[in-house]
Amino acid sequence: MEEIALGLARGFRDPGSTRFYAWVIWHAFRAHIYGYRPDAMDIVLWAIRRVSEGLATGSVRRPGALLVRLLKEQGLMDLFRQAPQWRVA
């Protein structure tokens, strides 16, 4: 998860948000695996592609903010916030 989050942070030129990107990926994985939102990974990948396309065209200045907005529109941010917190050793 960490490597993926670091890659997103580098690609989005947003190194201060690495932990947030890891949080999103972790929660999408959990939602998919435990079945409370089986399409969560697909939605996150779709949102990442949209942000990447916006960066490529120069139309996005705040990639993290766009990612949050897209995930909110799909209902994932609320779902992730309401999910029980677990720690993995």
Image (cartoon, helix red, strand yellow):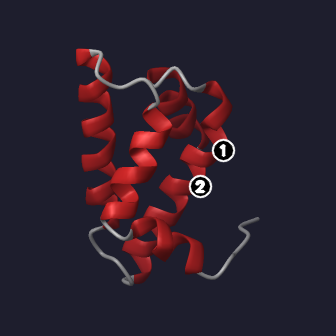
Crowding at label 1, few (<14), some or many (≥20) Cα neighbours within 10 Å?
A: some
* Helix, strand or loop for disc 2: helix
Give x and y (percent) for residue 26: 54, 59
Residue at 49 percent across and 73 percent down: it is: 78
Which residue in the structure is indicated by mark 1? 19
With respect to residue 88, does 8 lie above or below? above
Asked if the residue under mark 2 is in contact with the one under mark 1, i.e. CB atoms within 8 Å, the reply is yes
Residue at 73 percent across and 70 percent down: it is: 87
Give x and y (percent) for residue 36: 39, 84
Q: Amino acid at mark 1?
A: Arg
Q: Amino acid at mark 2?
A: Trp
Relative to the observer, which residue lies in front, 82 or 60? 60
Relative to the observer, which residue lies in front, 66 or 76? 66
Residue 42 relative to residue 12: left or right: left
With respect to residue 8, does 24 lie above or below? below
Which residue in the structure is indicated by mark 2? 23
Give x and y (percent) for residue 52: 31, 29
Residue at 29 percent across and 15 percent down: it is: 58
